[in-house]
Amino acid sequence: MILDMHVHTRVSRDATATVEEYCRALQAYREVYPVDGFVLTEHRVIDRSIDYRKLGERYGLLILQGVEVDGDFGHILLYGVTDEFLRHVDITDRRLKDREVIRIIKDCGGIGVPAHPFRESLYGRALDSKQAWVTDVEVIEQFNGANTEEQNARASAIIARDGLHGIGGSDAHYVNWFLTCATVFERRVESMEAVVAEIAAGRTTPLRLPQPDPAEGPRSGGGWGGVGAGG
């Protein structure tokens, strides 16, 4: 099963795409490759206004929700966010403590994954300091569609060196950034609880998604591909 694990919409305020635009783009992309769905990881907010599972069912795909928060070393993708977790952590805080957030979400049954860990450091943190930090976790975002090749290569090198696990996502903020990287799950997942269990068990593989011939242009429902500088 394949999911794009890092997707933003207008809810994140620095993106323009809507969920339904992504749904139509994914339907069209399935003519190229069998991706099953995606996970919304809006910046510092979880959108409760839409039943995304029902929306996904309309399009024949899986839509789940996580969140992307701001830590002291960079951004963290959180999967399996519960009300219990939200009682302990204010996800709107732009300077959360990375290790604390990852510990708390694990205690609450979820998992925290450093996002694009070797993109230019936030808050003046040196990349070598970030490298030391990510060795304290078990999973990092290995392939990010808005990264440079060098940034993704750094993550891959750390995974190989330290025996970590990786996931992948497009970091889409616009439809034409969507479906560049994703994550292969060895087992079928239908819920966020299952996603967390599979990531924690290391039964995931990051994937660079094949891109259609640019000469063909985007098909009905939207475009895909491209590289940006997402968050």
Image: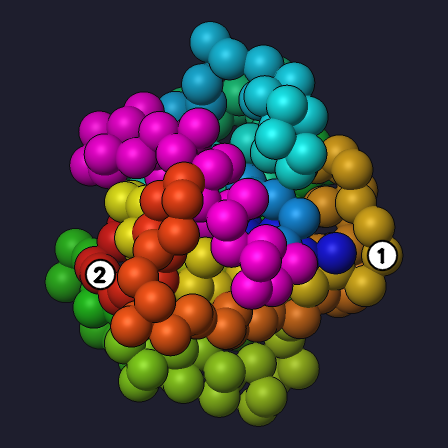
Q: Distance between the residues labelled 1 and 2?
A: 31 Å
Disc 2 element: loop
Q: In this view, does 152 lie to the left or right of 141?
A: left
Q: Between residues 31 and 91, which one lies in front from this camera angle? A: 31
Q: In this view, does 178 lie to the left or right of 196?
A: left
- Is 20 one of the magenta-colored residues? yes
| Residue position marked by numbered label 2 in the rendering | 228
Magenta segment:
6-34
Q: Can you say which quadrant of the picture contains the N terminus?
A: bottom right
The kind of residue tagged 1 is Arg
The kind of residue tagged 2 is Gly
18, above or below 26, in the image: above
Whether residue 221 is visible to the viewer of this picture, yes or no, is yes
* Label 2 Cα crowd, 10 Å radius (few <14 / some 14-19 / many 20+): some
55, above or below 226, in the image: above
- Is 107 one of the magenta-colored residues? no
Residue 147 percent location from the top left of the image: 30, 69
Residue at x-position 24% and y-position 37%? 15
| Residue position marked by numbered label 1 in the rendering | 187
Q: In this view, does 211 lie to the left or right of 88?
A: left
84, above or below 99, in the image: above
Residue 132 percent location from the top left of the image: 42, 75
Query: Where, by quadrant of the figure, is residue 90 drawn?
Result: top left
Residue 39 percent location from the top left of the image: 54, 41
Residue at x-position 26% and y-position 65%? 227
N-terminal of the pair, mark 1 or mark 2, is 1
